Image: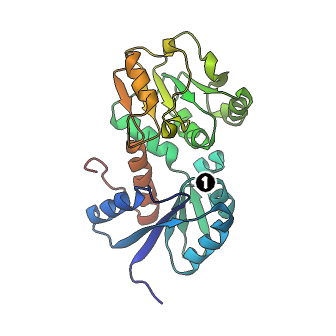
């Protein structure tokens, strides 16, 4: 059974909420490329089987979302530097010789989205809330932008300290407890916790925010409790993660197709 059209998909659990098919089909139309892009719901214990089946049937590439990114990292023998650092893969390219190449485009997506909003990163003081997989995926690209300092705040301090030990060779960063983020305002605060999904708000001191602080919540599609709270503290620049989602998808498209789509119109 041969497919003339190149096939791509996103795998995760749950998956029905994924916007990736719309985004990639928009890119394909824009770049005049014929391809298929579908959602595949996969539980972690079935990932290896699903991955092999998709590759064996001639699939060209996959996006990987939670909770499969670490499994995808293990399943790829070749990985780019960001995937290697993150120990997580969100984009897989199946090469003609049968090898699988793993990439992590999350941090590139975040940095590009911030840049498109005219937010400068060099010499800025950045606070990241959370220390889970989402943070692991964005640290290396952020540190490559040479911020003045990068602070990881997490409820469990040891998890944040673990990330510091893994990434401190790339720049100045340190760990604090979430309820101890300091008494001065940051230039940029990135909420990388999943609190926005549950209408909860990370508990940080109000004096971490002033009217110049850029607030970025990686949860997309709604005004999160964190963004609402930040606005009551005087924040005037607030963004959700939709731009990051689109930019990381554009980078995945470039990896697969060799051309970078224009993300402005989407």
- How many dots with numbers? 1
Q: Which colour scheme is used?
A: rainbow
Q: State left or right for residue 266 relative to residue 219.
A: left
Horizontal and vertical percent for residue 219? 46, 40
Which quarter of the picture shows residue 254?
bottom left
Q: In this view, does 236 lie to the left or right of 220?
A: left
Return the residue found at the far bottom: 1
Q: Disc 1 designates what residue?
A: 67
Residue drawn at 56 percent across, 58 percent down: 13
Up-down relation of residue 124 to residue 71 (above or below): above
Residue 25: x %, y % from top left: 34, 64
| Res 77 seen here | no
47 lies above or below 205: below
Q: Which residue lies furthest to the front in this view?
A: 199
Residue at figure coordinates x 60%, y 67% from the top left: 100
Q: Which of 180 and 263 is in front in this view?
A: 180
Q: In the image, residue 251 lies at what x, y percent?
A: 43, 53
223 vs 52, nearest the viewer: 223
Q: Say if residue 230 shows up in the picture.
A: yes
Quadrant of residue 161 in the image? top right
Q: Residues within 10 Å of mark 1 (few under 14, many from 20)?
A: some
Q: Nearer the viewer, residue 120 or 213?
A: 213
Residue 22 vertical position relative to residue 141 in the rendered view, above or below: below
- As drawn, the residue found furthest toward the top would be 183
Q: In the structure shown, which secondary structural element does the residue marked by tag 1 occupy?
A: loop
Q: Residue at x 45, y 88 (%)?
A: 2
Q: Where is residue 160 in the image (x, y as percent from the top left)?
A: 68, 30
Against 172, residue 196 (above or below) is: below
């Amino acid at each position: 059974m041969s497919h003339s059209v190149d096939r791509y998909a996103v795998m995760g659990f749950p998956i029905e909420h994924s916007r990736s098919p719309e985004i990639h089909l928009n890119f394909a139309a824009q770049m005049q490329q014929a391809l298929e892009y579908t959602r595949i719901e996969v539980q972690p214990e079935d990932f290896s089987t699903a991955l092999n089946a998709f590759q064996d049937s001639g699939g060209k590439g996959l996006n990987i979302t939670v909770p499969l990114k670490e499994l995808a990292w293990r399943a790829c023998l070749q990985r780019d530097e960001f995937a290697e650092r993150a120990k997580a893969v969100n984009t897989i390219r199946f090469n003609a010789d049968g090898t699988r190449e793993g990439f992590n485009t999350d941090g590139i997506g975040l940095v590009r989205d911030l840049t498109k909003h005219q937010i400068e990163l060099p010499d800025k003081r950045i606070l990241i809330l959370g220390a889970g997989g989402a943070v692991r995926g964005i640290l290396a690209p952020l540190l490559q932008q040479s911020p003045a300092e990068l602070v990881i705040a997490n409820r469990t301090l040891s998890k944040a300290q673990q990330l510091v030990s893994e990434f401190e060779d790339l720049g100045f960063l340190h760990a604090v407890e979430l309820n101890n983020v300091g008494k001065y305002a940051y230039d940029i605060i990135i909420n990388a916790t999943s609190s926005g999904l549950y209408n909860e708000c990370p508990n940080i001191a109000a004096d971490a925010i002033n009217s110049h602080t850029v607030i970025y919540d990686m949860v997309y599609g709604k005004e999160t409790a964190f963004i609402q709270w930040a606005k009551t503290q005087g924040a005037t620049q607030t963004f959700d993660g939709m731009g990051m989602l689109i930019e990381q998808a554009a980078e995945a498209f470039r990896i697969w197709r060799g051309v970078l789509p224009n993300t402005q119109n989407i």
